[in-house]
Every structure is written in structure tokens, then in C-alpha cells.
Image: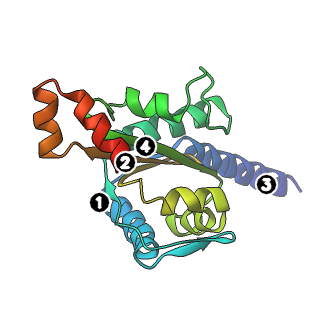
Amino acid sequence: MNKRWIIGGLLTILLLGITVLVQSQSITANDSFKQDFLSRINKVRAVGCSCGKKYYPPAAPLTWNNNLEIAAQGHAQDMNFHNYFNHTSKDGRNSEDRIVAAGYYFNGYRSFAVGENIAYGQQSIAEVSDGWFKSVGHCQNLMNPQFKEIGIARNGLYWVQDFGGRESFTPEEQKLIKQGNVRMIIKKERSE
């Protein structure tokens, strides 16, 4: 009888240790991690898909952005450490605040868009990706043609996907800006 208690106790300690290890583990985005995510997302973006009742036509492929990855890592780590699940950090910052703080700036660009998907508990890239595509709001972010770049991170059981899209000024617009003719750019945008 004592052997059973000892073995049961050891197994419990082992399982607790594994659970703590998994929950504190930060998955670094190595090339395999990045390529697996990009491949899965871009395969769907290439053919389009329905997010709920709305069909999204094919969109350009996303590329990896290290600043977006840093923002995603920070939020995944913060949620794991402070044991919460929300797009708003415990310090009150939203996804745009965190993304800009990670170096993904909007200054100098014609347009700027950011977004975020979060998940909890999935065990693999396939599982979390499938879940995001099955959720209307998450799917809409994944298929949003304004988003051109992505960074993804996992910390413990928390997953964060940060999106960004920046459109540069055309050479003609850059020339007008250098000449101080910002009004000409605004007029041009209104006429389009």
C-alpha cells in the first residue's frame, strides 16, 4: 500500500513539473516555426475563404516581420506570467500600443493598419491555425488584405499573432512631401 502512495506521489510531482515547464516555455520563432505558420496562412490567403458568412477573396501573401514578432512575444509572455487572457495588457496597453513600442512605426507611411489574434491552450501550430480560421473575427484578420506582415509567438499555452500593413508613399508623393506640397497629396487622395 505504501508503494502505491509513493509511486502516485512521484507521478503527481512529475506531472506538475511537466505542466509548469510547458506553461513557462517560450517558443522562439525559428525558421521552421515561421515557415509552418506562413505556409498555412498563405495557402488559404492564396485561394480565399469564407469567414463566417462573408467570403474573402484571395489576398497577397503575408511576410514575417521581426518587430511584430517582438510585440507578439511580449504580449504572450505577459499573459502567461500574469495569468490573464485579453487583448488589453494589465498595464492598459492595446495591441497597437505594443506593436508601435516594439518598433513597428507608422511615421513615413501613407497608410498603417495593425491587428491581433490571441489563443490559449492549443498544443500545435496546426491546432491554433485551424482554430483561428474557424473563428470569424480571427479569420477576418488572417484574410484582411490591408495586412502585409505578421509576427507570431507562443509562451506556455498562450499564442499571439500580430499583423501589420504599411503602404509607402509613391515616388511622386515623396517628391511632393520633400517640396512641402502635402496639400497636393491630400487633394490627390480625395480625388481617387
Of the image marks 1 and 3, the number of the one nearer the N terminus = 3
Q: Which mark is residue 31?
A: 1
Quarter residue 24 falls in: top right
- Tag 3 residue: 8
Q: Is residue 185 above or below residue 37?
A: above
Amino acid beneath label 4: Ala
Q: Which mark is residue 72?
A: none
The reply, left or right, for residue 34 in relation to residue 159 is left
Marks 2 and 4: in contact by CB < 8 Å? yes
The reply, left or right, for residue 176 in relation to residue 63 is left
- Tag 2 residue: 165
The reply, left or right, for residue 99 in relation to residue 109 is right
- Tag 4 residue: 113
Instruction: Measure the C-alpha gap from mark 4 to mark 2.
Output: 5 Å
In this rendering, which labeled residue sits more in front, label 2 or label 1? 2
Q: Nearer the viewer, residue 46 or 5?
A: 46
Instruction: Label 2: state its secondary structure.
Output: strand
Instruction: Label 3: state its secondary structure.
Output: helix
